[in-house]
Amino acid sequence: MELSSLGLGTYLGQVSDAADAAYVEAVGTFLAAGGTVFDTAANYRQGRSERALGSAFMGVARERFFASTKAGYIPMPEGADDEGPRAWFHRVLEKPGILSVDELVDGCHAMTPKYLAHQLDISREALGLETIDLFHLHNPEQQLAHLGAEAFYDMISRAFEACEGFVASGKIGAYGVATWNGFRVPPGEAGHLSLSRLLKAATATGGRDHHFRWIQLPLNLAMPEAFLAPTQDIDGTALTPLAAAQVSGLKIQTSASIMQARILNQLPDGFAEALGLHTPAQAALQFTRSCPGVTTALCGMGRPDHVTENMAVLAIPKLDAIALASLFG
């Protein structure tokens, strides 16, 4: 399957039947326009984003789409507020022996093998998929300050071992890490993730043919660090996150490709037209999808009109290296 250079994200939107229905319609429009990549997470819209995608996928040939999801946060479902968070946690996770309070970080995050397995099965059921193409650890850097570097990478090794087991059992095709600050901040800053150490953990766990194949990180015109900042050390060479992933053979999803629409009012007049496009959203997406190494630029598209506007970008060539460089002087 060819992976589309734009992917439909499902983070934003109200927790409502109307929002679900709009997402289902948007998925149909996206598929009709040639889109193939969909991204979600167990905690998006209290689990409703996964279920909306599952509804939209019904009747669609499996080879027509690529689905990625994430686990790490504790997704409180609808109705849990009536029960109370502590009572819900005890009933659903603690009493069955899936996750203890002591294993929580910041009261909301966990990446133990048992919890990842539990969450993956919930996601597979919600999406209606026997095999999810890509399973991300969701913002693993959330645990760095709590654990310290050595304990953190030990935890990553155990999580990767669990993910290799998920691949072997046919529950996922590959795994990765979906990050926010981790790859963008330089070494020495809080939350910095070393891609080199992650690859070392994957190799130690799964051998040279490990299934750690993807990373996800923000990239947009206001947050260009993935493209510009040499935050990663690969064999003694400082590289940008995009370049480091490329030389390591990893595919890349970008999140926040239009910064949840906040960037659109910051673009100068005439910017889109100068790129041969019509709207600020199209211009922002054209930058992100054109950056070398980016496999798919994810963008929240909760309505068919969002899809129609954004997918028009696919009709023109990506920006070349000179044009990209000129955007930053």
Image (tube, rainbow, N blue to C red):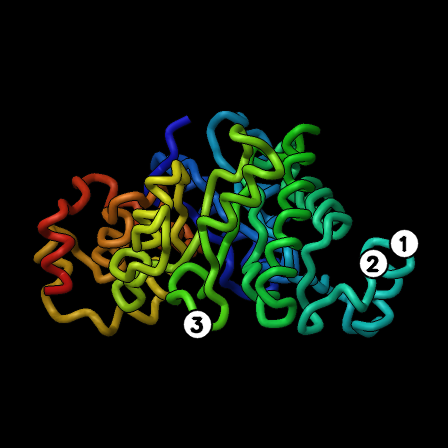
Q: Which of the two labelled residues, at mark 1 and mark 3, occupies the earlier sequence position?
A: 1
Relative side of 314 to 194, left or right: left
User: In the image, residue 90 lies at what x, y percent?
Assistant: 87, 65
**Circle 2: residue type:** Leu
Using the image as rendered, state which of residue 275 and residue 242 is in the foreground: 242
Query: In percent of the image, x 41 and y 47: which residue is there?
Result: 253
Classed neighbour count for the residue bearing mark 1: other residues with Cα under 10 Å, few (<14), some (14–19), many (≥20): few
Query: Which numbered dot is residue 237?
Result: none
The amino acid type of the residue labelled 1 equals: Pro
Type of the residue with mark 3: Glu
Where residue 265 sits: x, y (%)?
25, 73
Residue 203 drawn above or below residue 142: above
Residue 45 screen position, x and y as percent: 60, 61
Q: CA distance from mark 3 to mark 2?
A: 33 Å
Judge left or right: residue 242 versus residue 203.
left
Query: Is the Cβ of the residue at disc 1 closer than 8 Å to that at disc 3?
Result: no
Q: Which residue is mark 2?
A: 93
Q: Which mark is residue 96?
A: 1
Contact, mark 1 vs mark 2 (Cβ under 8 Å): yes
Asked where in the image residue 80 lies, by quadrant, the reply is: bottom right
Q: Gap between marks 1 and 3, in whole Å? A: 38 Å
